[in-house]
Every structure is written in structure tokens, then in C-alpha cells.
Image (cartoon, helix red, strand yellow):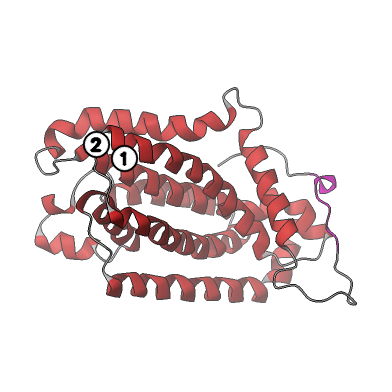
Amino acid sequence: MSGGPAPSAKMYSLRMTSEAQAPRPFPYGHLLYELTRTEVLMRDQGTVLGFLWTLLHPALMFAVLYALFVKWMGKFVDTYAVYLLVGLVLWNFFQKSTTYALGSFRRFRAPVLNYRFPREIVVFASVGAVLWSSAMEFCVLVPVLLALGQPLRWTWLLLPGVFALELLLATALGLFLAVCAVEFEDLERIWDVLTSALFYLTPVFYPLSILSPRYQELMRLNPLMQILQMFRDCVIAGQPPDAGIFLALFALGALGLVAGLALLRRLEFRLADKLAV
């Protein structure tokens, strides 16, 4: 997770809407934009290559994992390069977005303590910053897939919907992590260990078929595994996602988001007391 001092309150300009004005659907849209922009700048601050690390990190991971596993995994997956690349891009978004959301309240301690606004915007901004970098990755991913010989399929049009599902689940989880991280300072290290384990428990660089039927059934309980499978089916096989699984994951993400917002509302003042210490 990116370190450094908390942003100064002078970086933010929060303007309250006059009661006489007509209500807008989302009056904090400009605030969300500014906080997301600040998060993006903070992530690139102090680095020589800046946002290019967004592209270099998955590229280096791809090169290492492909060199190590292509001879073994290539026996089970014909288009292993495409399979691995898709898995890494989706995994990186999940890992970075949840990790960045986890520390969002401490990074934005100054505005949280000094201004009145919906606290979830801080978490949304952190996830939005990672979403921006992932958008850059997807802009590179499509031509790379074509260069690797992957034919263009009509199911590629469904990819934004599958990715939006991952965004929903990551945001919901990020809300819980952000709230719990204020209460338990060790959660950052714990989550780092858990995501490292989850990387190997999710078929990012290996196919599900190499596991025994018993473990395959257990792995299917992992929502991230289902999202990776749906994305790969759309990209490689030209097969649309299973509607039942998609709706079940959407319901899980929506319920998680509502529960996370409810938890944040309930503990809002307690979190402020913790941050003020």
C-alpha cells in the first residue's frame, strides 16, 4: 500500500449546496472526482516512471509466470498466454482496489475529520483510482490479445458487464475493510497475507481442470474464480456468462454494498474518534 503523510486539508475544496437550489441526484459528484484525482496523483507521486508502473507491474508478472509455467500449464490450456494475461489483469484490480480501499480513511484523515460529507466517497475514490489504472491496462490488453492471435468475438461486448461485477464486489469488500482497518491497525498486514494466499487459491495462472473434482467444487465457491471464468469464456471461448451465476454474484455484491454502507453509517462517529487519536 502506498505510504506517506496524510493529504492536507488544503488540497480539498468542499462546497455545500444551498438549500434553495434544486436537489441533484448525486450532489457529491465533483467531490468524488477530486478525491479520485488526488488518489491517482498520490499513487504516482515520487516515482520516476509514474503511471507507467501501472503497465509494467502486470507485464513483469506475466513474463515471470509465463516463463515458469508455460511448459506445464500449456498442456492443459491451448491459449495459455491469453489465459494468464486475462487472469492477471483481473486479479491485479481486485488486489489493488481492496488494499487501497483498506487504508483510505487514514490517508484522508484530514478531510474526514474536518468536513461533513458521506464517508463512503473516500472508499469510492480509492477504488476509482485503481479503476483508472485498470482502464489503462485494458487499453493495452485488447491489442495484445489480438497480437497473440486471439480472434475477436462478439462476446467481447459483454466484458464491461463482467468487469462491472468485479468492481461491485471489490467495492463492497473495500467498504468493510476500510471500516475494520480503522478499528484494527494490524488489518493491513493481515490482508496482505490473505491476498497472497488467495492468489494461489484462485485459478489465475493455472486451470481449474488440474484439480481434483472435490477441490474444483470448493474453488467454485470463490466469487473471484467465477468472474475469471466468465471473463475468459467471453474472451477465449466466445461463450456468454451463465445468467444464473451472474445474477447470484450481482445479488451478493449488492447485498455486500448495502451492508457495508449500513456498517459505515453505524460506526461513523466511532471511526472519527479513532482517527482523531
**Identity of the residue drawn at 60% across and 52% down:** 126
**Identity of the residue drawn at 63% across and 54% down:** 125
Identify whether 272 is placed above or below 136. below
Q: Is residue 123 left or right of residue 62?
A: right
Q: In which quarter of the image is the N terminus?
A: top right
When asked about the image quadrant of residue 61, the answer is top left
Q: Mark 2 points at which residue?
A: 81
User: Which percent across, then down, holds residue 179?
Assistant: 60, 63
- Numbered range of the magenta stretch: 8-15
> Circles 1 and 2: CB distance less than 8 Å?
yes
Q: In this view, does 46 lie to the left or right of 257?
A: right
Residue situated in front as seen by the camera: 63 or 1:
63
Q: Is residue 248 left or right of residue 113?
A: left
Q: Say what secondary structure mark 2 lies in.
A: helix
Residue situated in front as seen by the camera: 228 or 261:
228
Q: In this view, does 215 lie to the left or right of 61?
A: left
Q: In which quarter of the image is the C terminus?
A: bottom right
